[in-house]
Image (cartoon, coloured by chain):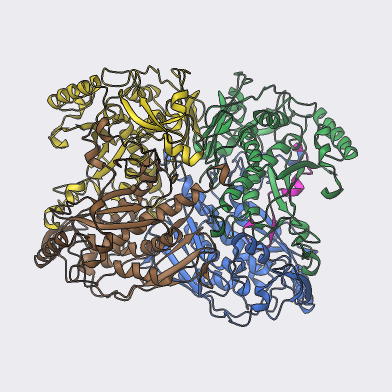
Chain colours: A green, B blue, C brown, D yellow
Amino acid sequence: MLNTLGNLLSLTTFGESHGLAYGGIINNFPAGLYIDLEKIQLELDRRKPGQSAIVTQRKESDIVKFLSGIFDGKTTGTPIGFIIENENQKFKDYDHIAQSYRPSHADFTYDKKFGIRDYRGGGKSSARETINWVVAGALAKQLLPNIEFHAYVSSVGEIFCEKPYQVLDFSKIESNIVRCPDAETADRMIAKIKEIKKQGNTIGGTITCVIKNVPTGIGEPVFSKLQAELAKAMLNINACKGFEYGSGFCGAKMTGSEHNDEFNTDFSTKTNLSGGIQGGISNGMDIYFRVAFKPVATIIRPQNSIDKEGNPVNVEGKGRHDPCVVPRAVPIVESLAAFVLADLFLIDKTRNIAQL
Amino acid sequence: MLNTLGNLLSLTTFGESHGLAYGGIINNFPAGLYIDLEKIQLELDRRKPGQSAIVTQRKESDIVKFLSGIFDGKTTGTPIGFIIENENQKFKDYDHIAQSYRPSHADFTYDKKFGIRDYRGGGKSSARETINWVVAGALAKQLLPNIEFHAYVSSVGEIFCEKPYQVLDFSKIESNIVRCPDAETADRMIAKIKEIKKQGNTIGGTITCVIKNVPTGIGEPVFSKLQAELAKAMLNINACKGFEYGSGFCGAKMTGSEHNDEFNTDFSTKTNLSGGIQGGISNGMDIYFRVAFKPVATIIRPQNSIDKEGNPVNVEGKGRHDPCVVPRAVPIVESLAAFVLADLFLIDKTRNIAQL
Amino acid sequence: MLNTLGNLLSLTTFGESHGLAYGGIINNFPAGLYIDLEKIQLELDRRKPGQSAIVTQRKESDIVKFLSGIFDGKTTGTPIGFIIENENQKFKDYDHIAQSYRPSHADFTYDKKFGIRDYRGGGKSSARETINWVVAGALAKQLLPNIEFHAYVSSVGEIFCEKPYQVLDFSKIESNIVRCPDAETADRMIAKIKEIKKQGNTIGGTITCVIKNVPTGIGEPVFSKLQAELAKAMLNINACKGFEYGSGFCGAKMTGSEHNDEFNTDFSTKTNLSGGIQGGISNGMDIYFRVAFKPVATIIRPQNSIDKEGNPVNVEGKGRHDPCVVPRAVPIVESLAAFVLADLFLIDKTRNIAQL
Amino acid sequence: MLNTLGNLLSLTTFGESHGLAYGGIINNFPAGLYIDLEKIQLELDRRKPGQSAIVTQRKESDIVKFLSGIFDGKTTGTPIGFIIENENQKFKDYDHIAQSYRPSHADFTYDKKFGIRDYRGGGKSSARETINWVVAGALAKQLLPNIEFHAYVSSVGEIFCEKPYQVLDFSKIESNIVRCPDAETADRMIAKIKEIKKQGNTIGGTITCVIKNVPTGIGEPVFSKLQAELAKAMLNINACKGFEYGSGFCGAKMTGSEHNDEFNTDFSTKTNLSGGIQGGISNGMDIYFRVAFKPVATIIRPQNSIDKEGNPVNVEGKGRHDPCVVPRAVPIVESLAAFVLADLFLIDKTRNIAQL
């Protein structure tokens, strides 16, 4: 459904950068699950601004408050409503931005589509919306306790984590502020981001996400293939420019004899270029995918632009900005992946008469 | 909605490789549009097997028959039902395949999920399903007569069309059997596919799609961003492994000062790394994206595999197969792009009080 | 989703009175169910025109052909496509009707909405659409083998079956052509319909539907309450003017002390004015509801009407018509009830962590 | 979509009787509409408890707070989030109720379905949920400024407003506390409710809703007929047992020659037994329908019941309760009707190529 995430388990959200609050409603979440609220807050803290030297210094405590759907610590099966209040919405003078279009922002397209926009901090187009997704994703993770979601920064600009995910120690992801489990690469990434930040510039990057212990059978055969639902979720993240899973774009260079994953006799496969999905349905192997993020459009430099009438103006970002979005996007990617899997996991429970 | 394409304008489909027919229902298509049936058939012919030396030699006439929703040559606003009969379903002996799992096919995952599968020609997992999508896309194109959809093969294996799309002559796409508008590259691609075919092997490739004359305002702000809907549609195509739009994965290497698209005073932009979409909404510039396809899993070689009980077996593709899927996927990519745009175009008509 | 029945299990349909065929796609039907095709045909035969002296004499064999989704006699979990070909579409001269609006038909509203309509036999607005619903409902019944659906004609005009459903013998429903299980009332209904038919007139009636052996827990708490989904389905039937369940409109005259259903210690209730549903969720008692149908608008008499320009014209139904719709609507009501229950039954399988 | 109201324009809600707040998200509301917040609050005040002697004395100020989607007084086209805080949730001892099932309440069905329920004040099953619907309906009314929605109490118990709606003065609806525009009938209704209240009992009633100035063309041809969407919305209201529109159940007693609505030459009809809808689509005449409400289950008397283990217990409502739900349900019925019409009105804007 339009502007809603999920098919059965669903997330509907609201909120603007400088409005009173963000929030959302999770519908059709199963009843009877004990919810660990601290774990949810931990995920929000991972996404939070101001957590390290390489992310925006906007200060928000980002505390989620659940308003319904949880009783005596357990989900009740009824809608889970939640809000996160905005604390740091400075009602400063936005009049200059109100009339100007920042390059590669949504200012122009919102105005053309809606004829009106909340220009304070980007309004609805702000990536702060993703806070809602982290709440929902954190709940989805608890619904799928055996499935592990490991996202990490696999590149910043030209700096790539060259090691395959199989040799990385995911327990190291949170050991550094850029969230790359390879310490040496992480150091270079952090240095790069600091340099970029000093220049008032921004830089892109990629995130790799590995999902382990996925049961077979998740995903639907026609228009709701597992990879399609993952791709859709990821491409909704602000600044996301691409998605590939399994062999991805590299697979397009290969031949069938190289690419086919031979079975072991236990139904696992010797290789996993398929990325854990065949015909849109999980096969029990690791699911892995990679997401590309462009550099954030807000830079702390003067840029030529135009106003609403098409007159040339000069715009310049100020103060707080994210020099590189990928460290904070790590929990967002995991959250969306978890929500997509939870939705399709629940649906799969209805797809075979033997289970009913 | 699950296993349905589109939010308002919707496509629901059925059909299996060796069933009696494919078909679908297009719901909520606007009334009063004169339909050029020949144009629809032309799109089907572009997708048809047996059309050239580098695609599968399966023979199907692939004639679509409309059963409802069109009257006196015009759409009536009521559901458009259509079928395409299967002619070439040979009911030969599939018993060996019935018990075996072909590597990198959906055989195993279908069996695990559903406990049953139509093993004849892959059943539902066959890419023949895309014939339905071409019918729907051809109708969507007619709904958007001013928007141009140009998809072409931009790589086969390691052979890339190095020229940017801006210098290509799209009228040349259909001038060669591989559907690459650059003649010299096309020749090399064709030679490569022939070589691969001779080896009984298959090879991957990419398709680039350029959409021109898109009005501003198409796309929705939260979970139905234009790029997200495009990505979802593409990742549903069999063998698709990745999607990127605008600067894509390359954009992840860039800095903000390089990547931002400066406005012209007519609201167009000097560069278009955004790929025609900002904040999920079209900005009037060209939309362009690239889709990766892995090599087809069916190869004409013996491969080690297993049967349903996990016993080692040998499987071998026979006779007709597509050595490279991308030439025939060109109209499929265009069709899905057109359907996604038509859906969001209609929705956009309801989003601004000034239009109502 | 718009013009689709069901939330998870879904039915999308097409077809017009004088088109080539009716048909539909049932999506997300569970895999592995052995389908008794004869039972489906039996339901279609119950709905078929020409089956008795008191229904329309249009002759159609109404044979359903399944095109996908069933393999080796079992559902595969993939979309079930089906068609029913129209045999009796006489392409006679409809030009007079093409320009005229028949009273209380959809001619005028279709023209105003769509600017075009298939005027042959009412086109899409024909009740022949319900043939699709019977196919889907017959499948849904097989998915819920323990639940019994008993619909019967409870009134024709002023003739009511006064006995409460509890004392009726449902096995008698098919023992007479009007489908009222009380023989004496049935006789009077049949006589009334014959008299009305002789006059070229039509008459309304009601259908009562009783659903037995419903498990507890079916239905959703907010906007998908079981009674709401039933009401929606029923009000989509042509000529349906009202829906009530349990105590219905009579309940509006009662007091709480009269109306409350006291529990037995086995969780059943002594009375069942609730109609088997509390808070939108089944409680295990019989569900029963009543549906009102107006008299068919087509009468074999001259009527004053207007043409497209508002000029007075005279219209007159000819030949074949249904003097009373309720006997043939009995399987339609059952079918929709079964489909609604099947959809919510599947959804309920995902709503409680203890079941997952 | 499950537990969401609307197809394109949609409402998703949360909240429990004794939770912190109710609230909802309205998605896909058009941009650019100036919102009169006072009018919204007025509708909430009409629904509010404690407003007169014949409704529950629970005290709530029921102030809605909009959290997003409105900027500079106008809708922005992005999700409209709102909350209404609960003020009067007394955390008294609910332990007795926690273990007991009240007759004709949702206690038992929630427990069976979910295995858990918020027993404080009925939790999610409380009719306080309708407060969210009034907010959404009040917005929908502003989107459809020319359409008039007039609901009124047409019966309380056996006391009926015998006059047809055409002779009633709708401006009198708010002139008495029972919301029946006929003063004499209103007096008798009020006396009856006071009597019932004194007895600690409750009583049912009906509401008639008349919608004037509806444009032609609203409603969809297959499964989203206007009357079906209205019926579904109404049957979701707590205590609602039935819906009929136009001639309703009376129409089932009539003949076609009596029931058909003859056209005038201006395309209006001389009679309007159709209730303003033909073939599921509005014809421009008044839409009118009637909704039945059973008596509220909570009565201030001892009742036999059972606990979770099936042991006999005695339950008794205390203090505040609604002796008759219909006066407060008047704005709820109007709100849902307005929301349904707004949704289908927006969809209709996309259904005809001449409008695009």
User: How many numbered circles does the render carry?
Assistant: 0
Q: Is residue B91 above or below residue A89?
A: below
Q: Is residue B318 visible?
A: yes
| Residue in front for this viewpoint, A213 or C100 | A213
Q: Is residue C126 visible?
A: no
| Magenta-colored stretch includes residue D347 | no
In the picture, residue B16 is in which quadrant? bottom right
Where in the figure is residue A23, as x and y percent of width and height?
56, 30
Say which residue appears at 57% left-offset and 32% top-offset. Answer: A74
In the picture, residue A264 is in which quadrant? bottom right
Where in the figure is residue B151, as x and y percent of width and height?
64, 61
In the picture, residue A183 is in which quadrant? top right
Q: Is residue D268 above or below residue A187?
A: below
In the rendered view, does C11 fall on the left or right side of C170?
Answer: right
| Magenta-colored stretch includes residue B248 | yes
| Residue in front for this viewpoint, B42 or D345 | D345
Say which residue appears at 53% left-offset and 27% top-offset. Answer: A67
| Residue in front for this viewpoint, A37 or B289 | A37
Say which residue appears at 31% left-offset and 40% top-offset. Answer: C270
Q: Magenta segment range?
A: B235-257
In the rendered view, does C252 fall on the left or right side of D314?
Answer: left
Where in the figure is residue A236, as x and y percent of width and height?
62, 43
Where in the figure is residue B229, as x and y percent of width and height?
58, 50
In the rendered view, does D225 fall on the left or right side of A182?
Answer: left
